[in-house]
Amino acid sequence: MVNVKYCKNIRLIMIQFVDRERELEYLNEVWEENVFQLVILYGRRRVGKTELLKKFLEDKKGAYILLTNESMRENINYIKNALADVLQEEYVRRLEVENLYDLFKLVKFGEERLVIILDEFPFLMEINPGILATFQKIVDEILSKTNVMLILCGSSLSMMEQDVIGYRSPLYGRRINIWKVQPFDFRTIYSITRDIEKAMEIYFIFGGIPYYLSFYDESLSLGENIRRNILTKGRNLYDEPLILLREEFRESRIYRLILKYLALGYRSLGKLCSVTGMDRGNLSKYLDTLRETGIVEHIIPYGKRRGGIYEISDPFMDFWFRFVYPHRAELEMGNIDTTLNTFEKEKNIYFGHKFERLMRELLAMKFFPEIAEYDSIGKWWKGEEEVDIIATGNNSMLLGECKWSEGIDAEKIIRGMKNVRGISWKGKIEYAIFAKSFKRRSQKAYIYDLKDIENILKG
């Protein structure tokens, strides 16, 4: 969890650097080793990589270079100028070179510790498909003999994971430090808002991407924030998912089609094949790619090894494809009220699903002290029967129900879980219920309302 001071306007906090303690500690540990180090730092678009690197660079001698997809010549010039500035050596700026290997070979780095950050590294790979082999030579023949810390940073998850650090990469097998920057989890959102229900509603829609959160104004209602930032043409988040898909995938239209139908409730492979017109083999490949990039999750019911359903796991992408994409024509004409009214009518059902997912996330984090021994966490369904949470550990099973509602009768929910007939388990079975509030609690289950969850967050 990050340490931030409470402020009534998330915008005032999030546009500044939010301290990522673990990431900074990791980078500083690598820095302090005082030998050549190669770091691959990556994460999805808008997750805060650049701000993290700039914060890391604040008290260090180093160069930050933002690469572009203009041309290799332009990027070489950017790198030359940055190195000339940080080394205070004008000869570097005047070097006449046609490739990066010759540039690094001619630069005299000296013995002083130095960090070089190449941000948006995949742009170089687009311009020159052989650039990784070039960097292999640069690392092996030149930089390995220096005191440089080289950081290659990128937003394209597929390129970074498959091409840069994958087993086919020319850099594979080298001593590489790898860190994937993740979105903030729910605990971070709460540490900013200090309001449990508001934090959940924000997380259910905006997720944990710092850039998205930076536009949320706590002085406005949730609906007004959605209207201003997501539903209004020309505003920052109006087209964000489409931009992300175009930057991440070559066949973005196909991924857009799949996400559209997932958001509409076509979650099984068979149903998706039917509505998209794609065969199972091709569709499975696209779904696997979406899963690998953290946009989609494949959920298999407890006790099964195959089948299951697919869900959009990224909160903002799910909200956008569920409520924005189907209404694009109206929104283009400025008719926002129809979309907003649709969301308001479906909000509780939609939030109920998100609340269930969040409780599974928190359970996986060992967030609840009384039930922290459970480590295999999922859900179960068969026919008309369904259990929101099913977890196992230490020869015990936990069955859990999640209700985004007030005044829940815990005893009634427990009776319903005990009547489930499709689950076979010979060991101990425990029960947990998560809800906004309860009118009747029970000693027969672990009971958590929003106040209980908030008390755990407060520590």
Image (cartoon, rainbow, N blue to C red):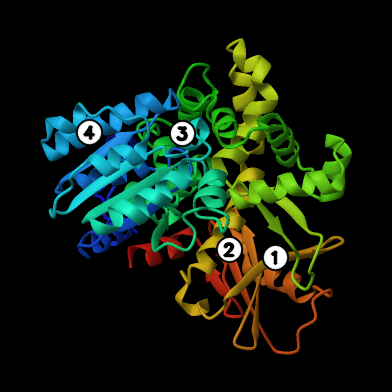
Q: Which residue is mark 3?
A: 123
Residue 172, compared with residue 322, is above or below; it is below
Q: Which residue is mark 4?
A: 82
Amino acid residing under circle 2 = Arg
Amino acid residing under circle 4 = Ala
Q: Disc 2 or disc 4, which is closer to the eye?
A: 4
Question: Which residue is more in the foreground, 164 or 13?
Answer: 164
Distance (Cα) linking label 4 and label 3: 18 Å
Q: Are marks 2 and 1 in contact (CB under 8 Å)?
A: yes
Question: Which residue is more in the foreground, 211 or 194?
Answer: 211
Q: Which residue is mark 1?
A: 379
The mark nearer the N terminus, 1 or 3, is 3
**Residue 348's image quarter?**
top right
Mark 4 is surrounded, within 10 Å at the Cα level, by few (under 14), some (14 to 19) or many (20 or more) other residues, namely some
Placement of the N terminus among the 4 image quadrants: bottom left
Local SS, label 3? helix
Report if residue 3 is visible in the image. Answer: yes
As drawn, the residue found furthest toward the top would be 333
Q: Residue at x 82, y 60 (%)?
A: 307
